[in-house]
Image (spheres, helix red, strand yellow):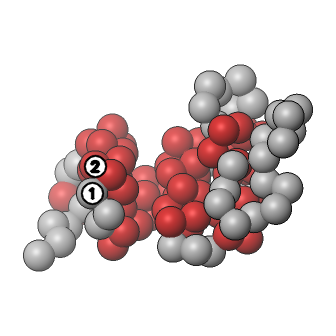
């Protein structure tokens, strides 16, 4: 059973993000999606939630959405380490980060 998440349950954004990352690491896309959507409902410009939703879309094979979300996260926080490396999406030609040697 997927636990309820979100402001209705009193979970903080930090708790939701931890839940989302744990779910992504354990291939629980439904729980990850639910937690990330709850964060984005309360904070639509939360760059980490946008980033991890892009990672989730990549895992789901939804490459166009993944690329758009990851680019949005990079543009919102261009100095964040690790965001650009997420653009190396398998199966997407030319998806390497700008300035890479690919």
The dot on residue 22 is 2
The answer to whether any part of residue 6 appears in the image is no
Q: Is residue 6 above or below residue 13?
A: below
x 60%, y 32%: residue: 82
Q: Which residue is mark 1?
A: 26
The dot on residue 7 is none
Q: Nearer the viewer, mark 1 or mark 2?
A: 1
* Residues packed near mark 2 inside 10 Å, few (<14), some (14 to 19) or many (20 plus): some
Left or right: 51 in relation to 3: right
Query: Would you say the residues marked 1 and 2 are in contact, meaning their CB atoms lie under 8 Å apart?
Result: yes
Point out the residue furthest to the left here.
1
x 19%, y 67%: residue: 4
Residue 17, x across and y down, in percent: 36, 45
Cα distance in 3D space between marks 1 and 2: 6 Å
> Quarter holding the C terminus?
top right
Of residues 48 and 102, the one nearer the viewer is: 102
Left or right: 83 in relation to 32: right
Of residues 61 and 46, the one nearer the viewer is: 61
The answer to whether any part of residue 33 appears in the image is yes
Residue 15, x across and y down, in percent: 27, 42
> Quarter holding the N terminus?
bottom left
Q: Quick one: SS at disc 1? A: loop
Q: Quick one: SS at disc 2? A: helix
């Amino acid at each position: 059973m997927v636990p309820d998440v979100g402001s209705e349950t009193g979970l903080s954004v930090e708790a939701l993000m931890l839940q989302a990352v744990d779910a992504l690491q354990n291939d629980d896309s439904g729980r990850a999606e639910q937690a990330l959507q709850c964060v984005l409902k309360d904070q639509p410009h939360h760059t980490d939630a946008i980033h991890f939703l892009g990672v989730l879309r990549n895992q789901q094979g939804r490459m166009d959405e993944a690329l758009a979300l990851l680019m949005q996260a990079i543009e919102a926080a261009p100095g964040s380490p690790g965001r650009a490396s997420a653009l190396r999406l398998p199966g997407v030609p030319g998806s390497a980060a700008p300035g890479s040697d690919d």
